[in-house]
Image (cartoon, rainbow, N blue to C red):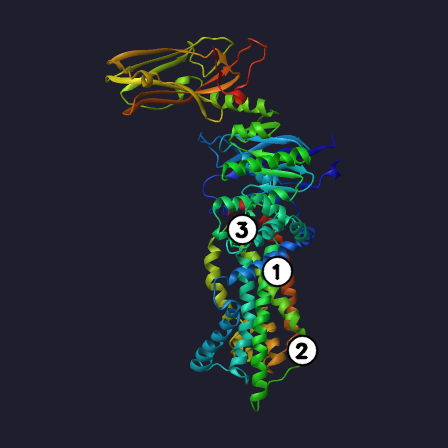
Amino acid sequence: MSNEWTTEIKPKKKWLDVDLKGIWRYRDLYVMYIKRDIVTKYKQTILGPLWYVIQPIFTTIMYMFVFGGLAGISTDGAPQPLFYMAGIVLWGYFSESFTVSNSVFSTNANVFGKVYFPRLIVPLSGITSSLLKMLIQLVLFIIVYIYYYFTLENHSLSLNWSLLLFPFYIFLIGFHAMSWGLIISSLTTKYRDLKFLVQFGLQLFMYATPVIYPLSAAPEKYRVILELNPLTPIFEAFKYGCLGCGSLNWGGLLYSTIFLCITLFISVIVFTRVERNFMDTI
Amino acid sequence: MSNIAIEFENVGKMYRLGRVGTGTLSHDLNRWWQTSILHHEDPYLKIGQTNDRSQKGTSDYVWALQNINFKVEQGDVVGIIGKNGAGKSTLLKLLSNITSPTTGVIRYKGRIASLLEVGTGFHPELTGRENIYMNGSIMGMTKAEITRKLDEIVDFAGVERYIDTPTKRYSSGMTVRLGFAVAAFMEPEILVVDEVLAVGDAEFQKKAIGKMQDVSQGEGRTVLFVSHNMAAVKNLCRKGIVLENGQVSYTGTQNQAIDFYLANNFSESKTRIADSIIFKKSFIDIYSIKINNSENVESTIVSNTEYLDIEIEGETKEPFSFDLIVTFKNQSGVPLASLEEGHYKGTIENIKIGKFKISKRIHLPKYLSKGVCLLDIVLHHPNVEYYMKCLDCAILNFDGNYDGFGVPLSLSARGFAGLECE
């Protein structure tokens, strides 16, 4: 008799309860969310998706002026535009994915308050649409890269086989962003203080990641701290793969992967707990 | 037994009052320590109290719902009625899995579509068509399913012309139509409706109610309907559940439930007619208002009663001139007939300082219909001011007229009274 019920709603669920079947059933919604993100973002703008490439161009110019020019931070022999753009493209992907995941509850309170669907759909589609944005910017990076490769003399630019790991880097960055975003988002539903911390925390975190400087330029005594940052080996490895600077640190990448497994695990637990009752606390 | 579609078993939901969200860290830690480490009962569950919003409680925790047990059979249309804050919306929220219960289990068969508020997930920048897909997939439809029903949905909503226009350009009514249409066509096994019909125009309301009837009768689906509109509940539902302070206080047919709700709602705190005075001049004291010599809120008017006696006793510190209005209304608050004699005769009565007694004998029509009426009793000086307003103060149960074929006509079908002719 009881096995006839299709759904049972109970107060306490298992502490790890990811509705993978549900996520699969709602895959069309996942696609719709990605579509919505892309379509609505630049509605009523003239340049439309061009903004995707204008942003990194201007940021690169700005960084060249401030960090390369005024501060005179080394780019480890790589051409400045390429060095900064490589950092910006990856960092942009991280920060965008983080922000999307971090605002899951606050921006979707309205929808979550009315209909049930597996909430994980929203951050997953969020990191996917920022992935698409990143890919567009990557095309720009490749164009600039080709330009420098053929016009610049005596350059140290070299592609090497480790670049094949690029999809893995992207996977790591996206899910690092999502798991941190979800953990903080879940806690923010109850303790709003975190909202203020996150605003400048993300900015500070960028400086703790080798985005605008190479790890080798950091003083020896701080390098250990930078190496604790799970994003450091990824950024370094990407630059190593295409710019010929940076380093490929297998230990670092392994550390980053293990780190991700742990945070992802925690984030999913916290998230599924909070999604059950967040309407009462938000 | 196998055709039970929804089952609530001992369901309860507790909320913490006051400053939700802040200052709860110590409670959280305490709760976690007690339940997870010491395996005690949740210390905050015990002190929860029943939810009576008008009374001040000693605990910060209240049960928005408690001991909810009921079953709904497949194909039933169940109206859930109750005062504001009785727990109706919480119940629907639990059922649609938006928030989880504190105790108990809810079981159901099939897919639930909830119209808690339609148009969920509508993005103002997206066009009507895009929003149909968005909204549909949020509610669990697949893309193929939506494409198959797109024409029907657009047709039902009546927004063909605007289908490729962003919904931010829609009127609020159009948005609701579109939202309702998507929900109505997703063919859920269980449809949950919460007061959405209030927004559309009359034509659309009719359409929506018709659709809901089709859904329940023709297609054998289950509908839960929450409303304050007794007429809609009466028309639409076959069963009724009355919620009161977070508990089920009555289950039965929709008519029994409505009667119970109305009777209970009035007699709960208001046993005397004069308890319903919502306004009076400060120089006036009202001792009692009597209908047929009784101060009781409820009275039965048997067949062929010729008169209705109304008597108001009180005292005034200032003289005033008044006309008495007695309005008969149906359960939805629609006025049916009224006594306002001064208006027709152009007269007004004077009251001197001191004790007074106003007595009126109303002639009732011969062919009164069978049904329930509510009364408003008002003292006013026409076009000048009100002295006393006593609204929804009495319930009259008309027995109806049994002369002739021995079957009375009903108030809801034929109105207040039958006309006579030569």
Query: Which label is found at residue B161?
Result: 3
**Local secondary structure at mark 3:** helix
Residue A263 is tagged as 1
Query: Is A259 above or below relative to B69?
Result: below
Badges 3 and 2, same chain: no
- Looking at the picture, tell me which residue is in the foreground, B353 or A243: B353
Whether discs 1 and 3 lie on one chain: the answer is no
Crowd around label 2: few <14 · some 14–19 · many ≥20 (10 Å): few
Q: Are marks 1 and 3 in contact (CB under 8 Å)?
A: no
Which amino acid type corresponds to the residue marked 1 in the rendered image? Thr
Q: Farthest residue toward the bottom?
A: A154
Judging depth in this view, the residue of A220 and B21 nearest the camera is B21
Q: Position of residue B410 (x, y in %)?
A: 55, 18
Q: Chain of mark 3?
A: B
Disc 3 marks a residue whose amino acid type is Arg
Q: Position of residue B141 (x, y in %)?
A: 65, 49
Q: Amino acid at mark 2?
A: Ser
Quadrant in the picture for residue A214: bottom right
Q: What distance separates the C-alpha of mark 1 from that of mark 3?
A: 50 Å
Nearer to us of marks 1 and 3 is: 3
Q: Position of residue A256 (x, y in %)?
A: 63, 68
Locate the N terminus of chain A and report the quarter of the image it occupies.
top right
Left or right of B39 on screen, residue B118: left
- Write down the residue under mark 2: A162
Percent across and percent down for residue A272 are 61, 51
What is the distance, in whole Å, between disc 3 and disc 2 at their CAs? 55 Å
